[in-house]
Image: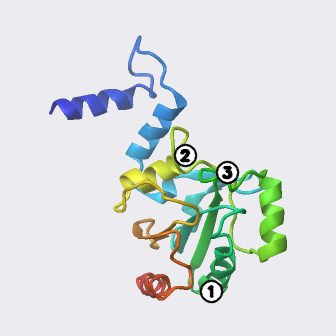
Amino acid sequence: MFRHFLVVSALTIPLGLGVGLPAVSAEQEGQLMAAKTTSLYDFTMDDIDGKPVNLGSYKGKVLLVVNTASLCGNTPQYTDLETIYEQYRDKGFEVLAFPANNFGQQEPGTNAEIKGFCLTKYSVSFPLFSKISVKGADKHPLYQYLTEQSPFPGEVEWNFQKYLVDRSGNVVGRFHHRTKPLSPEVVKEVERVLEVN
C-alpha cells in the first residue's frame, strides 16, 4: 500500500500536480516514462538523419531491435542483419539498429559517420537510428523499458544484443550479443513470430 502511494506520488511530479516539489531531472523523467510504458510503440526515436520516427509506425510488423557499434568484433553481424532483413521483410519483418558507444568506446563517430560506414561497408538498407545510450546513468528510456520493464529484464551486456518484438509491440525474445542473426535459434524464432497473426 505504501509502495503504491510512493509510485503514484512520483508520477505526479512531471504532470505539475506536486505543488512546491523540486523539479525532476531528465534521468528521473526517463525512468518515469519507461515505468509508464506498456509497449515499444510508445516511443518516438530520431532516425540516423535526426528525423523523428514514431515506433508505432511499425505496428503489425515483427522487429529485431539491436544496439550496434562500428568498431566491435561483432560488427560483421551487420552482414547477417542485412541478410535476415532481406529474407523476411516482405513478410513484415524489420531490423531497427540503435548505435551506442557504451562498450569499449566502439561507436565514437557522429551519426553521419555511422551512416556512411554502414552504407559503404555493409550496404545496410534496414532502418538506422541516431546514436543513443543503452546502459548507465544516461540510458535512453527505450532501453530502460527493454532492460527493466520488458519480460526480459537485465542490462545490455555488449554491442549487438538483440530483442525480438511481435506484431503487437510485445518483447518476446532476447538474444546474446554473440548469437549471430542467422543462427538457427534466431531464424527459428523470427519465423515463428512472423507466423503469428
Q: Identify the residue at horizontal 52%, vertical 73% (top origin).
A: 178
- Residue 160 in the image: state x and y as whole percent: 57, 66
Q: In which quarter of the image is residue 89?
A: bottom right
List the single residue furthest toward the left: 1
User: Badge 3 is on which residue?
Assistant: 105
- Circle 1/circle 2 CB separation < 8 Å: no
- Residue 11 in the image: state x and y as whole percent: 37, 32
How far, Cα to Cα, is label 2 from label 3?
17 Å
Q: Earlier in the sequence, mark 2 or mark 3?
A: 3
Q: Tag 1: residue type?
A: Asp
Q: Tag 3: residue type?
A: Gln
Q: Tag 2: residue type?
A: His
Q: Considering only vertical position in the picture, is 54 above or below 10? A: below
Tag 1 secondary structure: helix
Q: Earlier in the sequence, mark 1 or mark 3?
A: 1
Tag 2 secondary structure: loop
Q: Nearer the viewer, residue 92 or 179?
A: 179
* Badge 1: residue crowd in 10 Å (few <14, some 14–19, many ≥20): few
- Circle 2/circle 3 CB separation < 8 Å: no
Tag 3 secondary structure: loop
Classify residue 138 as left or right of residue 122: left
Q: Quadrant of the N terminus?
A: top left
User: Badge 1 is on which residue?
Assistant: 90
Q: Identify the residue at horizontal 38%, vertical 51% (top origin).
A: 148
How far, Cα to Cα, is label 1 from label 2?
30 Å
User: Badge 2 is on which residue?
Assistant: 140
List the single residue furthest toward the top: 20
Q: In this rendering, which labeled residue sits more in front, label 1 or label 2?
A: 2
- Residue 31 in the image: state x and y as whole percent: 44, 39
